[in-house]
Amino acid sequence: MELWYTEKHTKDAGLTLRVKETLKVWVSEYQTIEVLDTFEYGRVLLLDGLVMCTERDEFIYHELLVHPAMFLHPDPRNVLVIGGGDGGAVREVLRHPEVRSVVLCEIDNAVVETAREFLPTMSSAMFSDPRASIVVEDGIAYLKRNQAQFDVIIVDSTDPVGPAKGLFEAPFYELCLRGLRQKGIVAAQTESPFYHLEFIKGVKANMLEAGFESVHFYFAPVPTYPSGMWSWVVAGSGIEPINGLDAEAVKERAARMELNYYTPKMHGSLFALPRFFENALNQ
Ligand code: AG3
C-alpha cells in the first residue's frame, strides 16, 4: 500500500509526497507538529499540516532568508532569529565568523525538541555552537524587552495565520526597528508572489508605515512551498541591495563559507523581480 501526504495550497492545487514513514506526531500547546520521512524530499517538518521544511530543499529557503541581509550588513555581530525552531536559519547565521551571538526566539519549545531529535542537519549547530542561545518566548514579547541590540533580525515564521499573523503587521515591524542597532537590517519570509501578491503588498505598506526607509523584496524557487516560487524581504535604512553592496568584501566573506545556493554573483539578480511582481509592488 502506498501512503501519500498532500498539502493543499489553494482550493484546487497542492503538493503531494509519497511517505516512507511517520516519525513523530506531537500536539503541543500551540500546534500539531509532525515529522514524515518521504521518498523524494527526505524528512519533512509539518506544523498544523503545512510543510515548514524538507531535508532536501531547506538549504534554498534558509540560505536566502539569512545571507542577503547578513552580507548587506558590513559587520553583523548580534543576530536575533524569531521563529525558526528547526534551527536552519541559526545554522546559516553561524556560518558568518563576525557573529558573536545569535538568539533564537521560538514560541514553541516542542518544535525545538522535535528538531533536536529528528532534524539534526538543521538543528545541531544551534545546540553545539556556544554563540547560539535559545529563548522560548513570543517574539513580540521578547522584542518589547530588548531594544537597540541587534545588527540583523531574521523573521522565520510560518504562514500569516494564528500566532504568526502579528509577525507581518506594522506594530511588530516597529518593534523590530527599535530592536535594531544603527545600520541594522531585518529579513523576513514573505510567502509566494504567485499566490499571495496582495499580501506581499500589505507587508511592504506595513514596513514603510513602521518607519523602515528601504524595503526590498527578492525571490527564488523553493520546490515544496506553495507555487514553488517564494519571496523574502530585507528592510533597513539606506540599504541598496544591488548597488550598495561591497562586492569584493562579500566575495571574500562568502569564499570562507560552505554555501550551497547563495553566491555573491547572484546577489543583485535576486532583487531583479519579474514584471508582475515588480508592477504589483509599485502600484
Ligand atoms: N517558514 C516558511 C514556511 C511557509 C510554508 N508555507 C506552507 N507550506 N504553506 C518555514 C520555517 C522553516 N524554518
Image: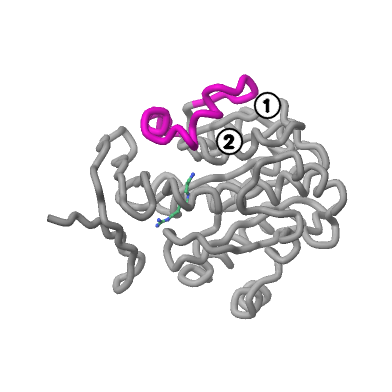
Instruction: Name above or below for residue 95 compared with residue 239.
Output: above
Q: CA distance from mark 2 to mark 1?
A: 12 Å
Q: Residue furthest left?
A: 1
Along the horizontal axis of the image, is 5 left or right of 170?
left
Instruction: Name above or below for residue 73 compared with residue 15.
Output: above
Query: Residue 87, image x and y in percent?
Result: 51, 35
Q: Which residue shows up at 64% across the image and 49% down it?
A: 187
Q: Amino acid at mark 1?
A: Ser
Q: Is 109 included in the stretch rendered in magenta?
A: yes
Q: Is 208 included in the stretch rendered in magenta?
A: no
Query: Residue 94, image x and y in percent?
Result: 65, 33
Along the horizontal axis of the image, is 164 left or right of 217?
left
Tag shown at residue 91: 2
Q: Is mark 1 within 8 Å of ligand 1?
A: no
> Of helix, strand and loop, which one carries label 1?
strand
Magenta segment, prevailing SS (helix, strand or loop): helix
Tag shown at residue 101: 1
Query: Residue 72, image x and y in percent?
Result: 77, 49
Residue range corresponding to the magenta coloring: 107-135
Which image quarter is the C terminus in?
bottom right
